[in-house]
Image (tube, rainbow, N blue to C red):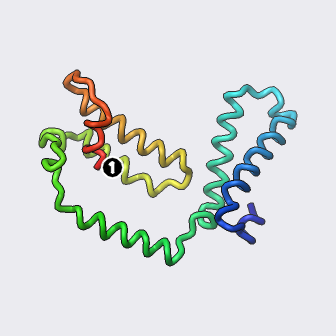
Amino acid sequence: IAGFLDNPPPTEQQVDLFRTLISDTLKSMQECNLWRDASHQELDVASDALEKYLLIKIYDCCFCTTPAELQKDKHLFQWIQKLSWITPEHLEIPHAVIDLKKFRTSVEELKKINSYKAPRDKMICILNCCKLLYMILNKDGKPSGADELLPLLI
């Protein structure tokens, strides 16, 4: 980790180096007496934990914000702001849905995403949001799919 942080590799090489590090570490773990008899599930949990730990440690190095990236973010934010006139009614979302506590909770779940560094944790925020939205959509017992979910995500 220290070598990675002291002398960061080019961005295009970081993913391959990271995957190699995870793979090599897991192979070493399996050869270690403490992990030799571990089940596949235990190794999966260890792999997830290792990935999360490493990503937290090297996050600033891998996801540093360059001036170009800041400019892209600013441009995207401005573009999204231009769409702020869109209301739930434009997306054919019933007003009753917007007032639901679960809907507000799903919005809060998405807002948590930037507080996490590991991709798995970010995906869990999205998954939790979608679960809450599907609960809202299916409360009347009517089946729903992506066509009904997408407007709520927007």
- Amino acid type, mark 1: Glu
Mark 1 crowdedness (10 Å alpha carbons): few <14, some 14-19, many ≥20: few
Element on which disc 1 rests: helix
Q: Nearer the viewer, residue 64 or 32?
A: 64
Vertical position of residue 14 compared to residue 146: above or below: below
Q: Residue at x 54, y 74 (%)?
A: 66
Vertical position of residue 21 compared to residue 85: above or below: above
Q: Residue most toward the bottom?
A: 67
Residue 152 x, y percent position in the rendering: 26, 44
Q: Nearer the viewer, residue 34 or 97?
A: 97
Q: Nearer the viewer, residue 19 or 44?
A: 19
Vertical position of residue 91 compared to residue 145: above or below: below
Residue 95 x, y percent position in the rendering: 12, 43
Q: Quadrant of residue 38?
A: top right
Q: Residue at x 26, y 66 (%)?
A: 81
Q: Residue at x 57, y 69 (%)?
A: 64
Q: Quadrant of residue 18?
A: bottom right
Is 4 on the left or on the right of 116, as rendered? right
Is 132 on the left or on the right of 23, as rendered? left
Residue tagged by mark 1? 108
Is 15 on the left or on the right of 120, as rendered? right
Q: Quadrant of the N terminus?
A: bottom right
Is 24 on the left or on the right of 142, as rendered? right
